[in-house]
């Protein structure tokens, strides 16, 4: 008795003929798919390892900053920038390094680091945060014109009240009372338009107190 009937033999013959004609192409496609899959999984592993290494360095920045170890903060932040340029962890690491420098009394180094974040971060909100902190350090350094320049660029809407408030602080420190009052008023106007809960409850009261202290100028 035959192992296959006639119809089955015809099907097998057709499959064999098709494979002889297309087998090399199929093998090539399978190989390409396998290589691509291996590459994708390899890339995923690489990305995970990179994220883990960046996380370790960022944790080192935070730990050293908490212990007020400015040289270690500086070293870890430098590693983040050199190994992971363009990453948020590097930008944040430099932000913390700047704060650490300022806490150690080195305002000029803090200013350089914050300026780096302003110039290099791709995140608009982080850029605005860095600009506010940078302007505060520039006020401490009595670099009032530089602080005003730092605040020149239009911020994201969420940061407008704080930028105007900081601008008012710069003008006040500079002795320009009218300009200071105008900036504080703009801060209050922007605050009134901001979504509820965007700022702490004390923000409005603080700005109003500053404005009242100017004697209604």
Image (cartoon, rainbow, N blue to C red):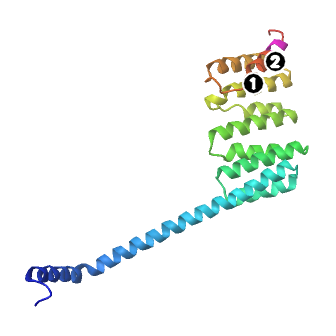
Q: Residue furthest front?
A: 1
Pick the front one: 50 or 178: 50
Q: Position of residue 110 (x, y in %)?
A: 82, 44
Span shown in magenta? 209-213
Q: On the image, which quarter does residue 156 sit in?
A: top right
Q: Quadrant of the N terminus?
A: bottom left
Q: Which residue matches tag 2?
A: 210
Furthest toward the right, the residue is 105
Secondary structure type for disc 2: helix
Q: Residue furthest left?
A: 6
Horizontal and vertical percent for residue 161?
69, 24
Rendered image quadrant of residue 198 = top right
Task: Kindly identify the residue that appears in the image at 42 percent across and 73 percent down.
Answer: 34
Marks 2 and 1 in Cβ contact (< 8 Å): yes
- Percent x, y for residue 114? 76, 43
On the rendered image, what quadrant is the C terminus found in? top right
């Amino acid at each position: 008795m035959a192992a296959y009937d006639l119809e089955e033999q015809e099907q097998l013959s057709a499959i064999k003929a098709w494979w002889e004609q297309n087998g090399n192409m199929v093998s090539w496609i399978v190989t390409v798919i396998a290589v691509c899959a291996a590459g994708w999984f390899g890339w995923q592993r690489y990305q995970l390892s990179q994220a883990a290494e960046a996380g370790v360095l960022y944790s080192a920045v935070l730990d050293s900053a908490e212990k007020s170890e400015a040289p270690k903060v500086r070293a870890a932040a430098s590693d983040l920038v050199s190994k992971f340029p363009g990453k948020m962890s590097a930008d944040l690491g430099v932000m913390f390094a700047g704060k650490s420098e300022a806490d150690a009394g080195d305002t000029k180094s803090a200013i350089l680091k914050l300026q780096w974040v302003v110039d290099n971060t791709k995140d608009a909100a982080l850029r605005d945060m860095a600009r506010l902190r940078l302007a505060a350090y520039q006020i401490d350094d009595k670099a009032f014109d530089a602080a005003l320049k730092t605040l020149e660029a239009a911020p994201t809407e969420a940061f407008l009240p704080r930028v105007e408030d900081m601008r008012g602080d710069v003008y006040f420190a500079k002795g320009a009372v009218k300009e200071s009052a105008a900036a504080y008023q703009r801060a209050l106007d922007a605050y009134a338009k901001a979504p509820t809960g965007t700022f702490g409850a004390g923000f409005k009261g603080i700005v109003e107190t500053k404005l009242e202290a100017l004697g209604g100028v």
